[in-house]
Image (cartoon, helix red, strand yellow):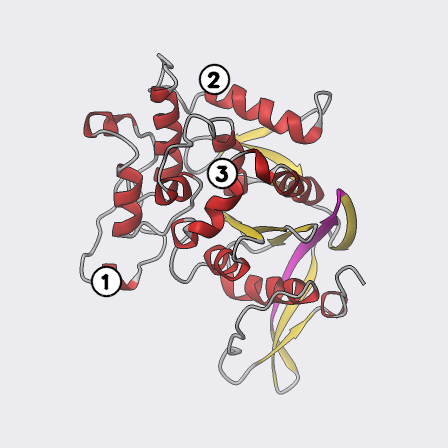
Amino acid sequence: MIYEPLLEYQRDRCVENTFCGAVSVIKDKSLIFSCGKNPIVYARSLFKPFYTRTYAKILSSLSDVQKAISLSSHNGSKKHVDAAKSLLSYKDHRLLQTPVAPPLLVETDDIRSHLKASKWIHNSSGHHAGLIRALIDGGTDEVDTYTFKNHIVFNNFIKELKKVYGNTYKFKKFAEDGDGLLTPALSLNEIAQAFEYLRLRQCDDWIWEAFSKEPYYIGGESRLDSEINSVGEGELIAKEGADGLLAVSSVKGFSFVIKMAHGWDPKPTRYIAKQILSAFGYNLENLNAPSKQKVKINYKIKSFKGFN
């Protein structure tokens, strides 16, 4: 099997839930730890920074909040929607091509507002609005087709990925993501390699620092990537992706990716991320185990010692 058990919930030593997945940890481009057999997965929202990075110079005058929301997979709260809308003039709002969607998670301040599903509430609206803003400010004529495969947005995205993997790299395939943009199929090791690239090139632009300056615009309240970005205080970047993906990179010289086989499930993913981060000296707050249950982490992960 390409996945292996990463975590169990036990009750009185009887296994009630088993969470399978895969993990890749890379140091300076070399694999130093893994669980699972390096599955091929779609990068999904993990690669939003690489779409945006091609326009980093054009977008350099944005506020910290606007920069963060342009990289985000946000919860769809009022503050997120307001930040996304602020990227475009009202007349350009019509250019947004995200699907109509409800909030990803309802945040405390939005409980009474009962936000209705819309294109702006879609978790990728800030990312799309940032790309549209870059096209308009850069003088691109064809803006309303920015999600198409033959558009300059996708062509520039490919050029950016070639910087990571080399000009001779042959992509396996692309598929349309839930937000309409194309996403590549890559191995878990290759995704970790991409986040190592962001670490190595962090001084080139504002992408890295945007994760820590406004961490709760990257995801939102109760989001694992926002918590890690906040705890890291500029040393870490973290990005969640659909279908159970989390990527993390550190200035200490490592990057890792977690893929949960059953899809997005922040609580077990958090246990695994916390264990890996603790091996490198970072601490997330403890979580309470599910009621009357005990959490048992894969022995390989629990015994991982970072660089030691």
Residue 245 visible (yes or no): no
Which tag, 3 or 2, sits closer to the chain's start? 2
Q: Amino acid at mark 2?
A: Ile
- Residue to which mark 1 is pinned: 111
Residue 22 in the magenta stretch? The answer is: yes
Q: Residues within 10 Å of mark 3 (few under 14, many from 20)?
A: some
- Residue to which mark 3 is pinned: 206
Q: Secondary structure at mark 3?
A: loop
Q: Which residues are magenta?
A: 17-29
Q: Amino acid at mark 1?
A: Ile
* Pair 1/2: label in front: 2
Image mark for residue 174 = none
- Residue to which mark 2 is pinned: 152
Looking at the image, is 92 positioned above or below residue 298?
above
Magenta part mainly helix, strand or loop? Answer: strand
**236 or 276: nearer the viewer:** 236
Q: Secondary structure at mark 1?
A: loop
* Pair 1/3: label in front: 3
**14 or 75: nearer the viewer:** 75
Q: Number of numbered discs present?
A: 3
How far apart, in angstroms, are the residues tagged by discs 1 and 3?
Answer: 33 Å
Label 1 with label 3: CB-CB less than 8 Å: no
